[in-house]
Amino acid sequence: MSSNRIFRTLLVAAGFGLLVVLIAPTAQAATDSASLSVNMTIPGNCQISGSTLAFPVYNTNDLDALAASTTFAVQCTVDTTVSVDFGGNRNRTMRNGTSSLTYQVSEVAGGPALGQFGDRIDGVSVAGNVATDVPIVGTIPPGQPTLAGTYTDTVLMTLTF
């Protein structure tokens, strides 16, 4: 084959290749858009965690009232102010079988007893998602005749928020 003929063959092949490229459809990426809605609800919810009010040893011959204190925790999902109601009577009773001891609970030492309707701790400020300790004080009046043993009671605390 002559070089002229090879040149023409290559020229025809190149032209044909160029023609294929020019008439072939061009591939393009297709796109589409949509919106994503995002939401979340944080309920105004609070929880109260109980505690134990443990008195020291009671002596019936003591002339002074016996006091003990503790805290209970309140936690809410958002910043809020709560109230804590104490069920039962102002004069509460711990029991050991048939023997009993009366006592009272209050917000502060020497404060009014909590227990009847309207007796509550008001205005406790709680920061969202942070446990807030609330103090409580118990007092046993002196001079109650008792038997040896363990005396117990349960106080229902109701949280209003």
Image (cartoon, helix red, strand yellow):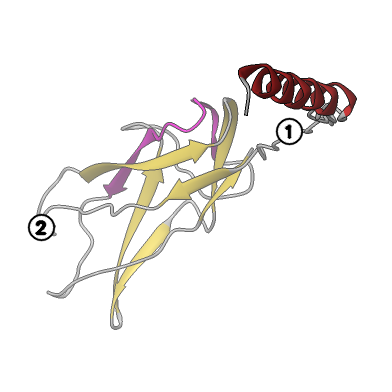
Mark-to-mark CA distance, 1 and 2: 64 Å
70 and 56: which one is in front? 70
Residue located at (19% from left, 53% from top): 55
Rendered image quadrant of residue 80: top right
The magenta stretch spans residue 125? yes
Residue bounds of the magenta highlight: 120-140
Label 1 or label 2, whichever lies nearer to me, is 1
Q: Is residue 103 left or right of residue 36?
A: left
Please give the label number shown on residue 59.
Answer: 2
Please give the label number shown on residue 114.
Answer: none
Q: Residue furthest front?
A: 2
Q: Amino acid at mark 2?
A: Asn
Against 52, residue 145 (above or below) is below
Q: Is residue 12 left or right of residue 51?
A: right
- Magenta region, main secondary structure: strand
Q: Badge 2, how many Cα within 10 Å: few under 14, some, many 20+? A: some
Q: Secondary structure at mark 1?
A: loop
Residue located at (58% from left, 50% from top): 116
Whether label 1 touches label 2, CB < 8 Å:
no
Q: Badge 1, how many Cα within 10 Å: few under 14, some, many 20+? A: few
